[in-house]
Image (cartoon, rainbow, N blue to C red):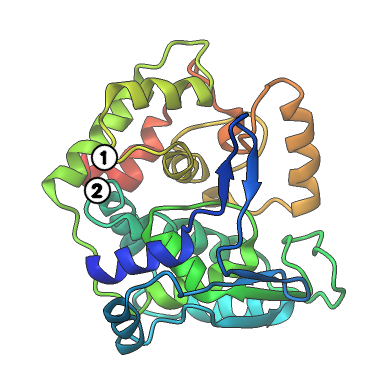
Amino acid sequence: MNDKLFKILKKVYFKKKYIKDEKGYLHEIDCGDKFDCSTKTTCYSTNNLKADEYTYLLENSYPVNEVVHFTHNQCIEKYKSLLQNSNINLKSCLSAFICGFNSFPRGRQPILSYLFARAVPSHAYDSDSYCPLCSIKGNNWIQKGEEIFAWYYGYAWNELWGKYVIDLEEFSKLPPCIPTDNDIQIFRSVIEHIRNAPADETPGKLEQRIRKAKIIPDYEKFRFRGQLTVLAELGIMPNSYVKPLYDGFTPFAERCEINGKAAKNFRSDIILPLLGWNGSNPINEERLNELFGVFM
């Protein structure tokens, strides 16, 4: 995705949807977007685009409002099938993650999707509710264009696994990511800040400290939290509550129960495994060297 297309899509997906009145109260405005209650997806208006921007969008065949449907069983089958793709492996996903620190924000999500695909057991589930094993619903409608744009914007997360099949499918078609010197330097700086955490530091306080250090370009809390989540799911940022995806699979229902117990000890919207990290045990140095030694 080039910069021109990215800027146009940002206008489509990040419209102004509220205004403040003279008392400071927010009021929703009609921006043209329509929510579909049956699929729980949004059809985004392109009326705010200039004529040449809309033409460029059409010329690039970007799936602005394409909604795809996967059943639970199709998701699991696709995940396992994608593991056979030669472009999707631990090395390529780790390299993309390093690129995600500056040169290629799109590179942040694939390692999480890969770890899930590798760890989740092959299984079937035919109910329309959330599967207690993997959390994927029986039926999943995904706004493809919106999700792909969010990944290019730098978001990464370890929930709602039904949609990340699309992440791996799109990532498998991209050329290999080669980290720049700047990517590597930023990554090293983040690791050093984590390594030097005060013993009583929480993930939230770590985020604030790194924000103040101004080492992350275009820092935004939730995008950066996704990067920390990767380090937690790789086991580089240890926790004592649940094993990270790199080490194996914990059923969804069990994770929810453990997360609920862990959350009682913290006032935070962060989830496991990152939630369980603290500065008294900041870095699993052995795991760091195993996975990223070539970059250290």
Query: Which residue is identified by label 2?
Result: 102
Q: Residue furthest left?
A: 181
User: Is 23 on the left or on the right of 38, as rendered?
Assistant: left
User: Is 84 on the left or on the right of 35, as rendered?
Assistant: left
Is 63 drawn above or below residue 272 in the view shown? below
Q: As shown in the figure, which amino acid type bears the numbered disc 2?
A: Asn
Is 220 drawn above or below residue 95 in the view shown? above
Element on which disc 1 rests: loop
Query: Which residue is identified by label 1?
Result: 217
Q: Tell me what residue is drawn at x 38 percent, y 20 percent.
A: 209
Residue 290: numbered disc:
none
Q: As shown in the figure, which amino acid type bears the numbered disc 1?
A: Pro
Q: Nearer the viewer, residue 90 or 53?
A: 53
Q: Quadrant of the C terminus?
A: top left
Q: Position of residue 177 (x, y in %)?
A: 24, 64
Q: Position of residue 190 (x, y in %)?
A: 31, 31
Q: Residue furthest front?
A: 22
Q: Tell me what residue is drawn at x 68 percent, y 22 percent.
A: 267
Q: Residue furthest right?
A: 127
Task: Count all numbered tags in the image, as a single digit.
Answer: 2
Q: Tell me what residue is drawn at x 39 percent, y 62 percent.
A: 10
Regarding residue 90, the answer to whether it shows in the image is no
